Image: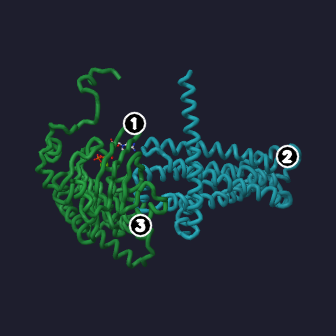
Amino acid sequence: MVEKLQQLGQRTLELFEKLGRSSLFLLQTLMGTLEMLLRPRLVIAQLHSVGVRTFLIIIVSGLFIGMVLGLQGFTTLSDFGAEESLGVMVAASLVRELGPVVTALLFAGRAGSALTAEIGLMKTTEQLSGMEMMAVDPIRRIIAPRFLAGFISMPLLAAIFSVVGVIGGHMVGVGLLGVDDGAYWSQMQAKIDFNEDILNGIIKSVVFGFIVMWVALFEGYDAIPTSEGVSRATTNTVVISSLAILSMDFILTALMFGDI
Amino acid sequence: MVEAVVNAKDVLVSVKDLSFSRGSKMIFDGISMEIERGKVTAIMGPSGTGKTTLLKLIGGQLHPQKGAITIDGQTVHELSHRNLYRLRKQLGLLFQSGALLTDMTVFENVAFPIREHTKLPESMIRSLVLMKLQAVGLRGARDLMPNELSGGMARRVALARAIALDPMMIMYDEPFTGQDPISMGVLVQLIRLLNDALGLTSIIVSHDVQEACAIADYIYLVSGGKVVGHGTPDELRHSDSEWIQQFMNGFADGPVPFHYAARDYAEDLVAVD
Ligand SMILES: Nc1ncnc2c1ncn2[C@@H]1O[C@H](COP(=O)(O)OP(=O)(O)OP(=O)(O)O)[C@@H](O)[C@H]1O
Ligand SMILES: [Mg+2]
């Protein structure tokens, strides 16, 4: 019993230590990010590997989710004779929720885990410490450009996801199920509000991008420098960022759309 | 008396009463050393005594629990982040593993510190890098990626990178491991040449008694967290300490333990963990 308590205490201490380390890490990264504005080339290279490589999976997923929304929405709406509103339903679901959330989850799985593994391996093979000895701060040179690139890509990817999703919904709703083409677009145009829907969606995706990048880069940087350590860090990235995204989504949704 | 002689030297790095432990394992227990400016100093000792650890302490990547290391009058572990990085620009460390950046070519690896710390035009960087690669005999390998190099080649590239910015001091961690006799000879000459022609200070960590004696002006023997002997290669060769004799000649029997600290062998075999 005493042993269990001791273990619990130890775990808690370790958790707080890790939180402390990760906050310091974030602070240093943010300071490094400012410097990156002067070295845009490093960021552009990372935009390619972080953003562009996630592009395809985002498009394919967006298309399928949009198609499913079109199908499900049509069945539900047609019960009330409100098929004309399919466009609003698809767009609102995507822009408010599914766009930012699903993109962030895919982003964590695709880009986040890759970043953790990359940084963790650089640590294991002493590349980071080699850089330190060459008087190059790895947080500025390696971490900061990746952070900035991820932070920029995430909202763009979420926007692309939503756009493709709306097209997917159109393909199924208008193309297959016979919803009126004009109604699909005009209702959407009339009911989707810039501030209420689009802006809030963008804010969500920005927050999620921040979370994923922070978790992924820190886990890599803090990984135990062994192959097992790196593999555990990679798993951590996916698990922690997914949970953080979903819980943060609830909080943000409550603040934005709830009357709490 | 020894103290008086030591003080007269021009000391670049001084290690004073340094203690360092990892967890409960004591690695250094109050060691002191003085590395003279302009000389090649070798640090030797059995595997696992903490030679690499010592280089990391000198480079400020680890902090001593007691004592201090001063380089050119600056106490390393007390420096601010900025000053530590300023100091490191003047140090080169050749890692035991090479520590090359795996996503860059050999050329880019050597160019890396130059690009990071200077604003030289591309043509100048090119000439500089090719010069350094020529010195280690790998100019022809400039377009290879680090994973296409052999262990010995990688270490030579790392050497070219360590000297890219003409530092005031270079620390070599096992530069001779994995080199064939020819490149070994070239490396020994190169290290000596760099040291004398550019007026550097060199610290070499090595197991290789022959090569280290051939190249070093002064040798420190470290074992069990202490300095067990120091002197010029000649002094050590003629030392009457049993320990030094064993290490310098590579005898299997003697006071130097080959085994990592453990309980009695026979006892261990019959024991149940
Ligand atoms: N990251 C670490 N965590 C815990 N202990 C370590 C770590 N790195 C090294 N050690 C321990 O510190 C001691 C010294 O290691 P170090 O690498 O400095 O030895 P070395 O003298 O360079 O050996 P070699 O000649 O084989 O390279 C070893 O006993 C090792 O077990
Ligand atoms: Mg070593």
**A54 on left or right of B235:** right
Residue under label 2, please give it: A259
Task: Give the CA distance from mark 3 to mark 2.
Answer: 55 Å
Residue B113 horizontal/vertical position (percent) = 41, 67
Q: Secondary structure at mark 2?
A: loop
User: Label 1 crowding class (10 Å Cα cut-off): few <14, some 14-19, many 20+?
Assistant: few
Residue A111 placement (x, y as % from top left): 56, 53
Q: Residue furthest right?
A: A81
- For the point 49% across and 62% down, the residue is B82
| Amino acid beneath label 2 | Asp
**C-alpha gap between disc 3 and disc 1:** 38 Å
Task: Pick whichever, A113 or B251, lies toward us.
Answer: B251
- Asked whether the viewer can see residue B173, the reply is yes
The residue that mark 1 highlights is B24
Of the 4 image quadrants, the one containing the C terminus of chain A is: top right
Residue A238's image quarter?
A: top right
Chain letter for the residue marked with disc 1 in the picture: B
Chain for colour green: B
Mark sitting earlier along the chain (3/1): 1
State which chain is coloured cyan.
A
| Observer-nearest of A256 and A35 | A35
